[in-house]
Amino acid sequence: GKGHSGFHEGHLMFNDESSLQMVLTVVPEDKVEPILSGLKPFLERHSGSLFVSDVCVLRKGHFESAES
């Protein structure tokens, strides 16, 4: 597609030189701002998208640490 940095062609994906990555994470609300603050400088230098959304975790106990 065409983003702020110009046209990005699909043929650049999935080769040894360039690829697209997707990272999904679920964190407690108090961790969101520190994570966004850390990612902001990276996203100012590189292309990418970031989405923040509320979620409902169905198997909450599966993701809780022993410290919780």
Image: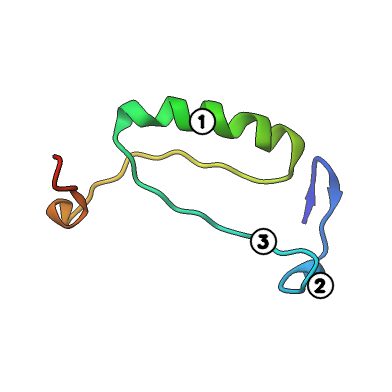
**Quarter of the figure with residue 14:** bottom right
The residue beneath circle 2 is: 11
Q: Residue at x 13, y 47 (%)?
A: 66
Query: What is the spatial separation of the Cα atoms under label 1 and label 2, in whole angstroms?
Result: 30 Å
Query: What is the spatial separation of the Cα atoms under label 2 and label 3, in whole angstroms?
Result: 11 Å
Please tell me which of labels 1 and 2 falls first in the chain: 2
| Secondary structure category for the residue under label 1 | helix
Q: Residue at x 17, y 57 (%)?
A: 62
Q: Residue flagged by tag 2: what amino acid is it?
A: His
**Quarter of the figure with residue 59:** bottom left
Residue 26 percent coordinates (x, y): 35, 46
Q: Nearer the viewer, residue 50 or 32?
A: 32
Q: Do the residues labelled 1 and 3 touch (CB within 8 Å)?
A: no
**Quarter of the figure with residue 53:** top left
Q: Residue flagged by tag 3: what amino acid is it?
A: Leu
Please tell me which of labels 1 and 3 falls first in the chain: 3
Q: Nearer the viewer, residue 33 or 11?
A: 33
The residue beneath circle 1 is: 36
Neighbor class of circle 3 (other Cα within 10 Å; few <14, some 14-19, many 20+) is few
Query: What is the spatial separation of the Cα atoms under label 1 and label 3, in whole angstroms?
Result: 20 Å
Neighbor class of circle 2 (other Cα within 10 Å; few <14, some 14-19, many 20+) is few
Furthest residue toward right: 6
| Secondary structure category for the residue under label 2 | helix
Q: Which of 56 and 17 is in front in this view?
A: 17
* Residue 20 tag number: 3
Classify residue 1 as left or right of residue 51: right
- What is the count of numbered marks? 3
Q: In this view, does 60 lie above or below 38?
A: below
Q: Residue flagged by tag 1: what amino acid is it?
A: Leu
Neighbor class of circle 1 (other Cα within 10 Å; few <14, some 14-19, many 20+) is few
Q: Dividing the image into 4 quarters, which one contains the N terminus?
A: bottom right
Residue 11 percent coordinates (x, y): 81, 72
